[in-house]
Image (spheres, rainbow, N blue to C red):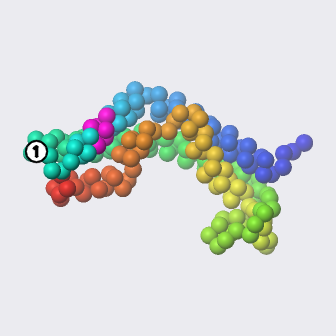
Amino acid sequence: MALPAPVAIVGLSCFVILLVEVLTVLFVSNSSGFKRIVADIDRTSKELERLASAGAASTTSAQKKRERALEVQLTYMSRDFFYYRMKQYAIMSVSLATMFYVLRTWYMGKSVAKLPFAPMFPFSRLAHQWLEKPGANDCSFMFLYVICNIGIKPNIAKLMGTQLPANVQKATDMQSMTSRFAKLTTGRGV
């Protein structure tokens, strides 16, 4: 007996997400270099926060030099961290693209579910992707697949403990890296 399409899509998505997390743990998170760089980024960002919270009024030139040195260290560590992040993205991309190909061959042009609502514009395009003459409430495999990845992946990452510490996430996000780099190149703010 074949599984209904929505159950198969959700089940396969969960399986692939779990597979990606296991492969990430095996090939990225368990390496000594990854653990070291995460610990170094965490320690450096905490020290930088401690210096910044001391206040701008009580900073001496030695503290400013120390803060600038920590900013430079954090910039280099963030760059090195992205080597491991790219390995994780490569594993995830190959797994999700393979899963997408399998689902596309099975469910191309077929409505896999009826939504209890009519999706609004940006989501309706995704919900009706590759459907021939879609109804207002029809759902393609693409919509269900994307929703599964958005909703399930963070929860599985939390359960498996593969989420990064908050300081590391904050220190390695693109916005803080660009602002830190801008501070270092212009010499302002420190």
| Residue 45 forms part of the magenta stretch | yes
Neighbour tally class for label 1: few under 14, some 14-19, many 20 plus, Cα within 10 Å: few
User: Which residue is depicted at the point 34% across and 52% down?
Assistant: 176
User: Which residue is depicted at the point 26% across and 53% down?
Assistant: 181
Viewer-proximal residue, 101 or 188?
188
In the rendered image, residue 141, in percent from the top left (x then y), is placed at 73, 57
In the rendered image, residue 24, in percent from the top left (x then y), is placed at 52, 35
In the rendered image, residue 32, in percent from the top left (x then y), is placed at 40, 26
Tell me if I can see residue 185 in this picture: no
Q: How many marks?
A: 1
Tell me if I can see residue 140 in this picture: yes
Which residue is under mark 1? 60
Image quadrant where one finds the N terminus: top right
| Relative to 33, 56 lies left or right | left
In which quadrant of the rendered view does residue 114 lie? Answer: bottom right
| Relative to 44, 10 lies left or right | right
Amino acid at circle 1 = Thr
Principal SS element in the magenta part? helix
Q: Identify whether 110 is placed above or below 121.
A: above
| Residue 87 forms part of the magenta stretch | no
In the rendered image, residue 149, in percent from the top left (x then y), is placed at 62, 50
| Relative to 132, 78 lies left or right | left
In which quadrant of the rendered view does residue 118 lie? Answer: bottom right
The stretch in magenta equals: 43-49
| Relative to 167, 14 lies left or right | right
User: Which residue is depicted at the point 16% across and 55% down?
Assistant: 187
Viewer-proximal residue, 137 or 84?
137
Secondary structure type for disc 1: loop
User: Which residue is depicted at the point 68% across and 45% down?
Assistant: 13
